[in-house]
Amino acid sequence: MSRLHTADPVLDAFAKEVGTEGAVAISGAQTRWNTGGELAAGTRTITAPSGIVEYIPEEMIVTVRAGTSVAELHAELRVHGQWTALPERGGTVGGAIAVGENDYRRPARGDVRTAVLQVRYVSAEGEIVTGGGPTVKNVSGFDIPRLITGSLGTLGCIAEVLLRTNPMPSGQRWFTSADVNPFALHQMLLAPGPILWDGATTTVMLFGHDVDVEADRGRIDSLGTFTEVDAPTMPSGFRWSLPPADLQDLSALDTGVFVAEVGVGTVHAEKPQPRTPLSPAVQLIHDRMKAEFDPTGRLNPGRIVGGR
Amino acid sequence: MDLHLDEDDLNSCVQCGLCLPHCPTFRVTGDEAMSPRGRIHLMREVQDNGAPLTPEVLESFETCVQCRGCEPACPSSVPYGHLMERTRETLADAGAITPLWQRAMFAPLATPVALKAGSAALGVAKRLKLVPKRLGLPDDLPLRQEPLEPTGTDVYFFTGCVMDAWQRDVHRSGMRVLKAAGIGATPTNELAPCCGALHAHAGLADQTRDLAEQMMGNLRDDKPILVDSAGCGAAMKDYGHLLGTTEAEAFSSRVFDIQEFLADHVGALPQVDPLDLRVAVQDPCHLRHVQRVHLATRTVLAPFVRELVEINDDGLCCGAGGAYSVLQPELAGQIRDRKVNSISAVQPDVVASANPGCSLHLAGAGVQTLHPMQIVDEALSQ
Amino acid sequence: MSLLRRAVDRVRGTDDSVRGAQDHTTDPLLDALIDALDPARVKFDDAQRSLLGKDASVFDGGNAGPICYPTSTSEVVAIMKIATQFDRAVVPRGAGTGLAGGAIPLGAPIVVAVTKMRDVIEIDEANGVAWVEPGVINLDLTRHLAPLGYHFAPDPSSQQVCTIGGNVANNSGGPHCLAYGVTNAHIQAIEVVTPAGDVVMLGGLDAEPDGYDLRGVFVGSEGTLGIATKVAVKLTKNRPAVRTLLLSFSSVRDAANTVSGVIAAGIVPAAMEVMDNAITQAVENYVNAGYPRDAAAVLLAEVDGPNEGIEIDANRIREIGLENNATDVRLAADEAERALLWKGRKTAFGAVAQIAPNYYLHDTVVPRSKLADVLDQIYAIAAKYELLIMNVFHAGDGNLHPLIVFDGRDEGILDRVHAAGAEIIEASLAAGGVLSGEHGIGVEKQAYMHLLFSDADLDHQNRLRRAFDPTCRANPGKVLPAGHSCADIQHLRSVPAGLWG
């Protein structure tokens, strides 16, 4: 028996539920349910198992089942002053990883793709498959966790993940200003935290040791007048993915009302981003990947990854 | 074929590859056969596994500049320079490298009269524009020179062959600076006509041994021997290894690079206004990688110029390599282009170089250099 | 060609007695490659072929096939198409510093050396990336970026020589990956020539590139999914303040416990490296950095960041060290001392050649809390097999590098070395670790993959590989163990008898 496999009746039961035939989809909290297209009619929906399996704060890792809510996970981590890169917006851990979107505080919290160290999923053939491993550094074979993250459940039914946690900075404060250039602000800060910009107002999170936050507070005052505010919430709507440099002139793009993540390139917008097809050679790899992992097309039919 | 290489020396290379970026020929070619790791691999193939001496194998050995930039980079302390010298000696003995016309080229170096005649002829040819510019020979090769006179008997001042013929002014500067520090010097002139470094590079170690014996026989006391050519100094410091005698060891321990020696006497030099110059120090490989005394150049120069700047290339070779620039002109040119770019990047007023080969080679690309002693001499005489 | 050069060649031409006649039998494959590149950049002589049969590992791949030195993406495309036409495998190669045999040529494939593709193409500050060619040397890139105030964060010990292409292939780490993350966290986009000869852009400069994360999958794939021809690397701002601490301990366990204690205290230093006594002495002989020769273990810990908070972390590390019986805590006085300490750490592996001519460097990862226990087991394994094993490791990541030092000329020693290595791997896995932290699987650890993964797991890894390379053209015989289609040596393409054997 390989080291990564431990007998777990909960996962065995889930594998049995996924089965070996018939269209099947995992339903989490359905906060991003139609990402990638609508689910094909007649698809059986099931839920993934939930619960925190093991949390080792001093190793900065947590093993959690996919059906667990991100809020529940983060409540447990907070006790030990830690968090993960997963976005907090009401969904499940499995859903967040299947969609692969990052939190708007990404510069302070890390990328979702970097956080998933190990993934366990049920394959289209009904087998439990493990990819990755329990350590941060790991080049033992092909990087299955990266492939599964953001795959919208089209390659396997995510059952359980092992995530990297990070210590929460002792200082985290938000400041806002109406007379500052957000790009100059980004350039000025050594390790810029989240910088949000709606075309007029700039809101920035300073984080680190309290003395570092205090020092940065002094620095940013040279750019404009800031006042301290509560952590913002992102508008619901559409999500654009742009190179950070493109944020400097959003007027050319038809976003409608927006909040842009400066230095990152994500834009939360009123209107959707126009779709662009993948290049034929990249599409070919996508098609082959899907065919390799799900030859009969039974996993989450209707959802298409790429070419939005 | 037995290259007569010591098996332990050969086995000390663990093929980690850390030498690669410090090798000028690998840097410009990206070809591992042109790297120290590659050359050692081929030595093993030839010596241990009977690999034939194909043109490619010989090219690999012959293209080595012997700058020894790989040695300080090597955590296993592989004696690469000695391995390569030994390889070339064996191959030259077998007639595989260093053909007769090249041997003929080295012969006059040890014979002052012949060298001066040849140099004067070259000076005339140069004036008649018969010599390719890229060789970097000085525009005014001296047709006739004033002799160097002794300034005292504290130390010997090694005058050598090519440098004495072409750059005697550098010797003059060095002796004036020594004098200013209260050190009287005796020029070696005919007592030590040539150190034999170029012969050793070409695999003609027997000739080097003869020259070493001759010099040791003529300089039989315990006075320090100062050398203002990095390549000559490195060769003379290696006589102990070359001859393997305690006498030679003792001789080698008396050899100092002139900056190395002066670094301990900087305080004795007069305090003068520094020259208003931004000076880049170009470390000759045989000063930095072999003698490893290149920091002394900075110690000696610093009080006499406005600013010293470092060339940001880890002391990578300029491609001069004794006669290398003549024997491998294409590679030497590419290596030099790299060096010239690194020099240009720091925008110096003057480049200081303590080796005649480097200065001639760089001059061929339009980079004028001064010997550190010429700069100090200039500052002292203003 | 110069007159002198021609004269040299003429002289050589007269003397055939000392050199064998080079077999210049051309074949259509060579002709095609030469037409696509140029004669000077396609090598096929015996010297070059034997030279590229090895990398920095202990494995010998036999002779390479033709060796190509492309200078552009279009030339790599041409090579891939020729490889397809002639049904030959292709092995990419950077500086050849890999330690798992990932770049050795199995079955005389076409070797594609990217060492002539070494331009920094563009520095795009507005998007926070630099576009570089795969042959750019890691440390050269960092030096190139220095005037702008940036660096490339992954800093493997071989950073002065290893290439960005090699870093991508092996998902390279390095001491400072503790805080900054391994290569995968620093690559935004990769232009890849697929095994079929298509040019694809994986990833992108935008925030969340569309589609499956093929960029993330490509990093660490050891040259089995295609050849990277351009890489967009993230720019990391240089930190204004650095504190480097050298802590000495009278036991390896105390050093390991300090490392666990620091992480448990919520501090993620830039780096935490441990060396045991044997390796510390070898290093000190080479660098003279002032490493204590009498300490059982030393911990090199570094914190960096803004000026203000850095002292808090540095002091806390000092306290945790003292709580764990540190016998001495020293702060590097200046940049020169810091550089010397790091030079010692980064050249540790080569420095052991003073002790014996051969070494075998292992690479496993264990949970930090198990470091001390696993190290005890490793010393016991060394005693059992009468071997000298030194330990130098990325302690903060739990990344062990047991170093077996030996003289390969001793009778039967290789069997002992391999047996000890196998036990080290098993001890690491038993402690909940993984096979490799940064060297990769290559040919070294294929046989151990079954210890970590089930057949189904490995089958899915092979499916991933096939989606890129259905015909197993790129670096076959690596990573996956025998029994998986691209791993089987039998599937390596047959080579025309006599020519490329």
Image (cartoon, coloured by chain):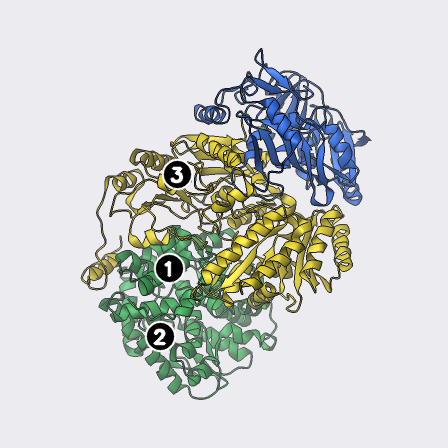
Mark 1 Cα shell of 10 Å, populated few (<14), some (14-19), many (≥20)? many
Q: Quadrant of residue B162?
A: bottom left
Residue found at x 35% / y 83%:
B214
Label 3 – label 2 distance at C-alpha: 45 Å
Query: Viewer-proximal residue, B74 or B180?
Result: B74
Residue B41 tag number: 1
Residue C11 at x, y percent in the picture: 21, 62
Residue C433 at x, y percent in the picture: 61, 46
Among the chains, which one is yellow?
C
Q: Are marks 2 and 1 on the same chain?
A: yes
Position of residue B115 relative to residue A148, above or below, is below
Give the position of the C terminus of chain A as an image quadrant.
top right
Q: Are marks 2 and 1 in contact (CB under 8 Å)?
A: no
Residue B244 at x, y percent in the picture: 40, 80
Among the chains, which one is blue?
A
Chain letter belonging to callout 1: B
Q: Secondary structure at mark 3?
A: loop
Question: Which residue has dot 3 on it?
Answer: C72
Q: Secondary structure at mark 1?
A: helix
Residue C43 at x, y percent in the picture: 31, 48
Mark 2 and mark 1 lie on one chain; the one further toward the N terminus is 1
Label 2 is placed on what type of residue? Gly
Label 3 is placed on what type of residue? Ser
Position of residue C384 relative to residue A143, above or below, is below
Question: Which residue has dot 2 on it?
Answer: B196
Give the position of the N terminus of chain A as an image quadrant.
top right
Chain letter belonging to callout 3: C
Label 1 – label 3 distance at C-alpha: 29 Å
Among the chains, which one is green?
B
Judged left or right of residue B244, residue C219 is: right
Mark 2 Cα shell of 10 Å, populated few (<14), some (14-19), many (≥20)? many
